[in-house]
Image (spheres, rainbow, N blue to C red):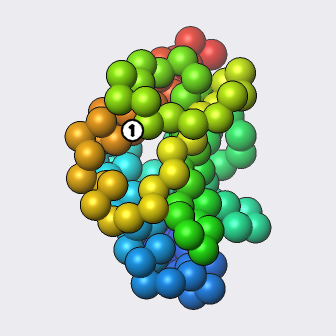
């Protein structure tokens, strides 16, 4: 299990194929997530950057996937979260995602609320499983 600080190289190497705008959105997402989940365990799998409590599917809370035009933030258990602003997309039974197309999207308080809720929910699921 490696922290974000230890994972800078693989994350940076994945991000080299994307524009500075996309790289900034990813960096901003990391910063937001770290306010709720300090020093998350980070894994890079293909084009996906996973953040959570541990490696593997069970420890996963977020998946950040950069694309040419936007960054997708996947939320494990996102289907169960309150989303009054309608930011979440997807029709999966469990997971949802948010597409961030501009850096300003990171300033939306509803985004931080969802990130906090996802962490809280993941903590709850984790403790229920013990």
- Tell me the residue at 47%/21% (across/down): 81
Where's residue 65, x and y in %? Answer: 61, 60
The N terminus sits in image quarter: bottom right
* Badge count: 1
* Quarter location, residue 29: bottom left
The answer to whether residue 99 is seen in the rendering is: yes
Could you tell me residue 28's position as x and y percent?
Answer: 34, 64
Residue pictured at 43% horizontal, 84% vertical: 20
The percent position of residue 43, horizontal first and vertical second, equals 63, 60
Relative to the observer, which residue lies in front, 73 or 125? 73
Question: As drawn, is 113 to the left or to the right of 2?
Answer: left
Percent of width and height locating residue 91: 69, 28
Which residue is pictured at 34% across the width and 41% down the height? 111
Please state, as top left, top right, bottom left or bottom right, where the C terminus lies in the image: top right
Left or right: 1 as drawn, with respect to 119: right
- Considering every residue shown, the one lying at the far top of the view is 128
Q: Secondary structure at mark 1?
A: helix
- Up-down: is 85 above or below 5? above
Residue denoted by label 1: 115
């Amino acid at each position: 299990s490696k922290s974000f600080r230890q994972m800078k190289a693989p994350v940076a190497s994945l991000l080299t194929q994307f524009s500075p705008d996309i790289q900034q959105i990813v960096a901003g997402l990391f910063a937001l997530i770290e306010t709720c989940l300090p020093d998350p365990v980070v894994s890079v799998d293909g084009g996906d950057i996973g953040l959570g409590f541990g490696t593997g599917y069970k420890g996963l809370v977020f998946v950040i996937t950069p694309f040419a035009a936007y960054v997708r933030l996947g939320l494990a258990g996102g289907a169960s979260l309150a989303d009054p602003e309608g930011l979440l997309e997807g029709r999966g039974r469990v997971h949802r995602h948010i597409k961030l197309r501009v850096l300003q999207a990171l300033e939306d308080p509803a985004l931080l609320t969802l990130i906090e809720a996802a962490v809280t929910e993941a903590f709850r699921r984790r403790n229920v499983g013990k």
